[in-house]
Image (cartoon, grey):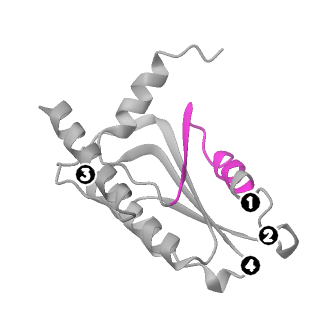
Amino acid sequence: MLGNVNVEIRRKVFDMMKEDRYEAYVHDVPGSDVVVEDSAVVVCYYGKDEARLDSTKKALGLFKLYKAKAGEMVFVESQLDEADAEVRDAAEDAGFAYYFVKADPDSEGLYIREALMNFGARRTSAEKIVFLDSDIGFCNPYWLQNVSLTLDGCDMS
């Protein structure tokens, strides 16, 4: 049954993409109260693009809706000025520990995402870290459990 639901979800999302409709697609699936203790989710956001800001807030809404919880959840935002930070409330409401990093104007566009990922990774002690762009949301509320179980079967030595 769940496999058929996932196929239906993928088909609807693919149809939206073909029509150049990039918007959050929410499928009414009950969330999971499971906390994946050995994992951390690190999400990074930088910039002032309104479409990306809107997508980020929708993606954070999916985290809250589906109750996707890692043992540690870190959200790192960077702007040139802290007064421009716009996602603190949405990140904290979705269960993330929020950090602001002041951007250096001389490094604009140069590996900012990677620096933010490293900053976030240093704030967690989890065995498994999932790095996400801020505007990524998942249709499957069990995605984090699935990722963790998949990594359990990988030789990481």
- CA separation, marks 3 and 4? 38 Å
Is 86 left, or right, of 100 in this rendering?
left
- CA separation, marks 1 and 4? 12 Å
Residue type at numbered disc 1? Ile
Reply yes or no: does residue 127 show up in magenta. yes
User: In the rendered structure, are the residues bearing label 1 and label 2 in contact, judged by CB atoms less than 8 Å apart?
Assistant: yes
Q: Position of residue 138 (x, y in %)?
A: 36, 49
Q: Earlier in the sequence, mark 1 or mark 3?
A: 3
Residue type at numbered disc 3? Lys
Q: Which residue is mark 3?
A: 12
Instruction: Examine the rendered structure and indicate whether residue 94 appears above or below residue 142.
Output: below
* Viewer-side residue, 109 vs 116: 109
User: In the rendered structure, are the residues bearing label 4 and label 2 in contact, judged by CB atoms less than 8 Å apart?
Assistant: yes
Instruction: Examine the rendered structure and indicate whether residue 109 appears above or below residue 145.
Output: below
Q: Which residue is mark 1?
A: 112
Instruction: Examine the rendered structure and indicate whether residue 24 appears above or below residue 102.
Output: above
Of the numbered discs in the image, which one, if any, rests on residue 80? 4
Q: Which residue is mark 2?
A: 108
- CA separation, marks 3 and 2? 36 Å
- Looking at the rendered structure, the secondary structure element under dot 4 is loop
